Amino acid sequence: MSQENVEIVRAVFDAWNAGDMDAVAAQHDPNVIWPPFEGWPEAETLVGREACMNQYERMRAAFDVDTAEPISDFVAAGDRVVVRVNWRGEGQGPDMNLELTRIYTVRKGKIFMVEDFWDHAEALEAVGLSE
């Protein structure tokens, strides 16, 4: 199951970078939860695929081109997958280069929760692992 979860998360990155937001949406559970990310301008918990997709679209709208590249291995921990990400955007103002660690919780073959951390070690601790 863990490798299947990694492949689901990897498919999200592939779809994002291909600009296929329908495929990104298809990987998310209809009731997906995205808790607030410390230090991020929007500080509310997002609930549901539509709310999460609206946030993704707002994030992408700030740039002409953006990519989200894994900069660590995908680490499977039970029903969770941890990955360090470099999100880059260009156009419509200053270029952006942001590193964060994301934990995806996968249930029944869909992403059920998305959690973001600035500190990679903190994210690993959240799933019971260490660097």
Image (cartoon, helix red, strand yellow):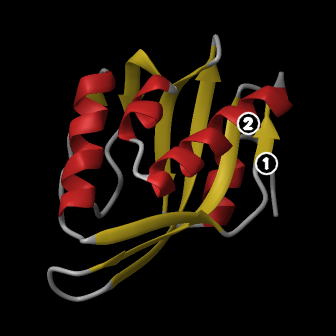
Most extreme residue toward the left is 92
Quarter assignment of residue 92: bottom left
Residue located at (72% from left, 25% from top): 79
In the rendered structure, which amino acid carries the disc numbered 2? Glu
Q: Position of residue 44 (x, y in %)?
A: 20, 40
Most extreme residue toward the bottom is 94
State whether residue 47 appears in this view: yes
Q: Identify the residue position indicated by label 1 in the image.
A: 75
Q: Earlier in the sequence, mark 1 or mark 2?
A: 2
Q: Position of residue 57 (x, y in %)?
A: 24, 47
Residue 92 appears left or right of 77: left
Total count of labels: 2
Q: Quadrant of the N terminus?
A: top right
Q: Nearer the viewer, residue 93 or 126?
A: 93
Q: Position of residue 16 (x, y in %)?
A: 46, 50
Q: Identify the residue position indicated by label 2 in the image.
A: 7
In the rendered structure, which amino acid carries the disc numbered 1? Val
Residue 89 appears left or right of 11: left
